[in-house]
Amino acid sequence: MVLLCKTINELRSQIAIHRYQHQHQIGLVPTMGALHQGHLSLIEQAIADNDIVVVSVFVNPLQFAPQEDLANYPRQLEQDLQICQELGVDLIFAPSPQEMNSGGDTEALNSTTAVIPPQNMTQALCGKYRPGHFTGVATIVTKLFNIIQPDKAYFGQKDAQQLAIIRRLIQDLHIPVEIIGCPIVREASGLALSSRNQYLKPIEREEAARIYSSLQKAKAAFYRGELKAIALINLVKQELSSVERVKIQYVDLIDPVNLQSLNQIEQQGLLAIAAYVGSTRLIDNIVLQKRQPIIAIDGPAGAGKSTVTRHVAHQLGLLYLDTGAMYRAVTWLVMQSKIAINDEPAIALLIQDISLKLTSPNAVNLPTVVHIDGQEVTNAIRTPEVTANVSAIAAQSKVRTKLVEMQQQWGKAGGLIAEGRDIGTSVFPDAELKIFLTATVAERAKRRWQDLQNQGRDDISIEQLALNIQQRDEQDSNRAIAPLKKADDAVELITDNLTIEEVIEKIIELYNQI
Ligand code: PAF
């Protein structure tokens, strides 16, 4: 049951119970309310990673310039409460401006203690057009960190400048919180979700989607080898010049960490845009990363993902990021260390500093070569004993967080292919190629039945197999950790009438078009 706290004292005493009586890890999702799918993805991530989740809902006057939309900014606390309740949030902090001592707007920053981020970060991008905005954000976020003292705090990558400034803020002020940046959530049209989308008229909404397609145009040019800022920026401008209701405020290519303008991409660049669509100001961005592409393959059980992935990896010379082998390796280590499979805190400690190495095998039908802390465990992790325990280990959120962190670290260099349920939506949301590999339930039941027949088993009917598959799909799509979901920008491949060879060929063809 979600608890609404309107005062700092109330919230602090609730948090104290969790922190000191129960040793709970606390996650914070700061918001200005009017929760949409983008916020939901932050909240879901926070719930997966922490014992207790606090969502703050506060339309912060200090980050609005006098002529901005403070008075009209959407406020819908009842609806937000309902959403948080359904998601399983524990505490909502919805203070009044008086409670936060943040009355007025950015002008009030002159009469309050303010947290002023480095000028060279606030003068880039939006800062030029929204003086005082990031000081207002830094001030309120620091207050929230001081009041709640979360272990982790979640911010969207859509506000990339805000995210970079907050990362710098906690570093400079030594605030002990881990900042988690979460990928942009988009409508099917590509439009990045924002509370301000509510202001858009239907035709404006349609044209606003062109902002993302213009960034995509630049991304495509980048993958063809265009590295110069001027050329990438001009592509975006050119693409939007014919869109009647979209008026660009800025397009810039900057370093995503220090926010300084780049002349050309050396390793990575953030291509960011702000534009008015009618009278609504929207922002969006993409990260352009110099690396070999990543292929993310998601889809339901029994669609042939792992066979296809192995073959594509082999043919393209990519590393098969065998996430299953990683969970097996951790399971093996836990069993070796004689720690109980359900002792989550001890397991979290055990894997804190593990070193895992995956190497492609010499032949496509051999398993991935796995080293853990220097020891080769390729076969040891594939025993029936490990198989019996691996799903209990994989369900532990701390194990998952640690392994996803390692996967994303490897992903920085690119050149890999991974398969699972949420690779394209959560592990590598910026993968260059996302495939949703699926087949109808009837087809998957038929294939499974054939496999069983080949093993000499004829004790289960196709109808029963279809029922099992349907139930498994439902469980996979609705589970709290890593639910199965097709990424909006994934290519769906329905394999009912395709051979394995045809599927592999199709994926290689798509890869060659990146
Ligand atoms: O991103 C937002 O919604 C706000 O800027 C934040 C971080 C909640 C501070 O008011």
Image (cartoon, rainbow, N blue to C red):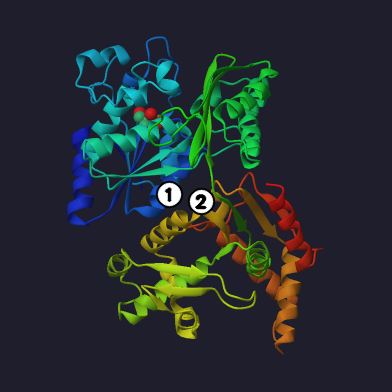
270 sits left or right of 333 in the view? right
The image quadrant of residue 138 is top left
Decide: few, some or many residues near mark 1? Use Cα within 10 Å; few <14, some 14-19, many ≥20: many
Secondary element under disc 2, as helix, strand or loop, is helix
The picture places residue 129, in percent across and down from the top left corner, at 43, 15
Q: Does the numbered disc 1 mark a residue whose Cβ is under 8 Å from ligand 1?
A: no
Residue at 41% x, 42% y: name it. 181
Q: Are marks 1 and 2 in contact (CB under 8 Å)?
A: yes
Residue at 48% x, 34% y: name it. 158
Label 1 or label 2, whichever lies nearer to me, is 2
Residue at 21% x, 36% y: name it. 173
Above or below: residue 502 compared with residue 140: below
Q: Does the numbered disc 2 mark a residue whose Cβ is under 8 Å from ligand 1?
A: no
Secondary element under disc 1, as helix, strand or loop, is helix
195 sits left or right of 472 in the view? left
The image quadrant of residue 115 is top left
Amino acid type, residue under disc 1 in the picture: Gln
Residue tagged by mark 2? 426
Residue tagged by mark 1? 45
Between 27 and 347, the one lying in front of the other is 347
Amino acid type, residue under disc 2 in the picture: Ser
Residue at 29% x, 26% y: name it. 118
**Label at residue 84:** none
